Amino acid sequence: KNGNIHYFSISTMATSNDAQSPPPPRSGVDFESLPWNLNEPEAHKYIRLTTTPADGWTASHYDPSSDSGLAVNPSSVHPYGTSPLPLFPSTTSLNYGTTIWEGLKCYRVPSTGRAAVFRPDKNWARFANGARAMCLPPPSLDLFLRCVQRAVTENADLIPPAGEGMKLYVRPMLLGSGQQLGLHPSPEISLLFYVSPTG
């Protein structure tokens, strides 16, 4: 971490000045011409964790002392294009709007090529505040940052080359993903992180 910038290692949890650089940008993608939209979805992977209102987010989801838990387990990573969310018509967020989201910018530092994310702790603070307002269990800062890093790592070749305005947009979401007809807390909560490269 350096002021408002977090440098994310692509292979470990380290967020320091010796963080490993990501692989080169994916060949065949004209990053500079990409619009502000969902781009290259067939190449994306997204992160999904679930819990219940009673359990909330625990060390089983992420334990920062050992860098372990579902957040770092391969089972939490899904191909965007072929693994859609299993949502039913009675999904709480579809009926009652119990969804929050944030948006983060990941980019390559021109001088080093490292992956950097701008002020993710501020995004987390807004995210947690919104979660409480929606009666959703907020993730810890450690869980939030680890999932951002995981989303960046899993999609590292979609980080555009260093250039004006080019970035890998990271969208965290928290939603009531369980089935509920009445106006009650969702029996299942999903924490999602997906990406899109933009020019």
Image (cartoon, grey):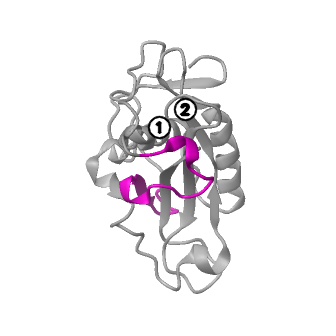
Query: Which residue is painted at 63% across and 55% down in the image?
Result: 101
> SS of the residue at dot 2?
strand
Q: Which residue is mark 1?
A: 159
Question: In screen coordinates, is 18 left or right of 38?
Answer: left
Instruction: Give, as a three-letter code, the residue at label 1.
Output: Ile
Give the number of the disc on residue 67. none
Magenta stretch contains residue 39: yes
Q: Residues within 10 Å of mark 1 (few under 14, many from 20)?
A: many
Question: Of marks 2 and 1, which one's residue comes earlier in the chain?
Answer: 2
Gap in Å between the C-alphas at discs 2 and 1?
Answer: 6 Å
Is residue 56 visible to the viewer in this orientation of the structure?
no
Locate the C terminus and report the quarter of the image it occupies.
Answer: top right
Q: Is residue 36 left or right of residue 187?
A: right
Along the line of sight, which residue is nearer the eye, 24 or 72?
24
Residue sitting at x 49%, y 37%:
160
Q: Which residue is mark 2?
A: 107
Split into 4 quadrants, where in the image is the N terminus? top right
11 is higher (above) or lower (below) than 61: above
Residue 183 against residue 158 in the figure, above or below: below
Task: Determine the residue positioned at 42% across, 22% down.
Answer: 14
Label 2 crowd bin: few (<14), some (14–19), many (20+), radius 10 Å:
many
Q: Amino acid at mark 2?
A: Tyr
Residue 148 seen = yes
State the image quarter where residue 82 is shown. bottom left
Q: Nearer the viewer, residue 95 or 159?
A: 159
Q: Position of residue 81 (x, y in %)?
A: 37, 64
Taking depth in this image into account, of 175 and 64 the one nearest to the observer is: 175
Residue 182: where, in percent of width, then height? Answer: 62, 85
- Location of residue 185 by image quarter: bottom right
Which of 22/184 is in front?
Answer: 22
Where is residue 112 drawn, in percent x and y?
48, 16
Tell me where the magenta segment starts and ends, as one range.
29-55
